[in-house]
Image (cartoon, rainbow, N blue to C red):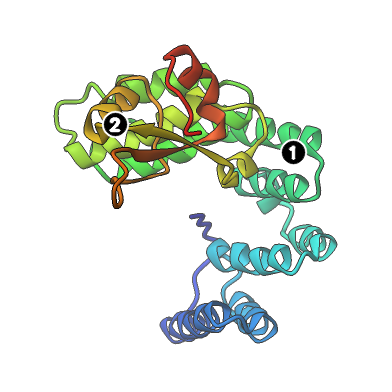
């Protein structure tokens, strides 16, 4: 997700840091958070330029609800690293988890001002585009983000998978409600019942509404259902589509 180079490390140390990181990932997946964070920290001590490892350490602090420790660890970054997009964007994330959305937005704005958008030349640039437009949205410029993705969708070399990827984020940004990154973790949904799932999916796609999931009719029921995130409710109501009773 993030990278920063602050000098070179030997191939031996680089390999050791990678091994420690991989072990930490497995421990974290198994729920052994204390052991995982210790290995992440050892890997980070070897290579302090690896902000992916740094971000993983912060992730465990968040998972353990130890936000103050996360802030303290972030504050240990060098003066130069504190002038980066990573620092302000991550600080914004932490303020969100601490329930301070206004402070979060201020840091997202600083990160956005430091960030630069590259020209989209190939598929690998699409992730950069999404990271940029997500930050653009959090900084209060969702219209710019939506327009930027819409312009990219005009590129002739995009595959259908590329288009689906871009449209999913475009839709999220278009209906963004100002709640920061945590808004994308909101799992509150409602259901729309239909006799023709394929037709309804097409209508939703045309209206930039993302689908959380769907199920076909079961047993004697003639209705299937499509699940949609709560953020799209206002558009659903304008389309006069009925929620399942």
Please rate how many residues cluster around mark 1, counting C-alpha atoms within 10 Å: few if below 14, some from 14 to 19, many from 20.
Answer: many
Left or right of 185, for residue 144:
left
Q: Residue at x 53, y 25 (%)?
A: 233
Left or right of 46, for residue 60:
right
> Of the residues under marks 2 and 1, which one precedes in the sequence?
1
Residue 125 position in % (x across, y down): 32, 41
Q: CA distance from mark 2 to mark 1?
A: 35 Å
Q: Residue at x 49, y 84 (%)?
A: 13
Q: How many marks?
A: 2
Q: Mark 2 highlights which residue?
A: 201
Question: Is residue 120 in view from this perspective?
Answer: yes
Q: Residue furthest front?
A: 220
- Nearest to the observer: residue 116 or residue 33: 33
Please rate how many residues cluster around mark 2, counting C-alpha atoms within 10 Å: few if below 14, some from 14 to 19, many from 20.
Answer: some
Left or right of 73, for residue 186:
left
User: As displayed, is residue 150 above or below residue 84?
Assistant: above
User: As displayed, is residue 60 above or below residue 84?
Assistant: below
Q: Residue 171 has which mark?
A: none
Residue 80 position in % (x across, y down): 68, 51
Q: Mark 1 highlights which residue?
A: 104
Residue 142 position in % (x across, y down): 54, 22
- Nearest to the observer: residue 143 or residue 234: 234
Q: Residue at x 70, y 83 (%)?
A: 34
Left or right of 158, for residue 54:
right
Q: Residue furthest right?
A: 68
Quadrant housing residue 208: top left
């Amino acid at each position: 997700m993030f990278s920063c180079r602050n000098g070179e490390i030997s191939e031996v140390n680089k390999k050791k840091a990678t091994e420690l990181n991989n072990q930490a990932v497995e421990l974290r997946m198994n729920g052994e958070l204390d052991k995982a964070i210790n290995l992440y920290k050892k890997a980070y001590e070897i290579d302090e330029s690896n902000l992916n490892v740094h971000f993983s350490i912060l992730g465990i602090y968040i998972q353990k609800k130890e936000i103050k420790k996360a802030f303290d660890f972030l504050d240990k970054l060098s003066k130069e690293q504190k002038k980066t997009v990573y620092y302000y964007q991550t600080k914004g994330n932490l303020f969100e988890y601490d329930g301070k959305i206004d402070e979060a937005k201020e840091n997202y704005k600083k990160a956005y001002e430091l960030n630069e958008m590259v020209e989209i030349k190939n598929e690998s640039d699409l992730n950069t585009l999404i990271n940029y437009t997500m930050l653009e949205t959090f900084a209060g410029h969702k219209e710019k983000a939506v327009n930027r993705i819409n312009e990219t969708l005009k590129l002739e070399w995009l595959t259908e998978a590329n288009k689906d990827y871009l449209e999913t984020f475009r839709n999220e940004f278009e209906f963004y409600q100002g709640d920061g990154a945590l808004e994308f973790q909101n799992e509150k949904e409602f259901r729309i019942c239909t006799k023709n799932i394929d037709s309804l999916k097409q209508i939703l796609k045309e209206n930039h509404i993302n689908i959380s999931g769907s199920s076909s009719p079961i047993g004697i029921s003639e209705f299937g259902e499509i699940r949609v995130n709560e953020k799209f409710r206002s558009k659903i109501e304008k389309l006069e589509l009925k929620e399942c009773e």
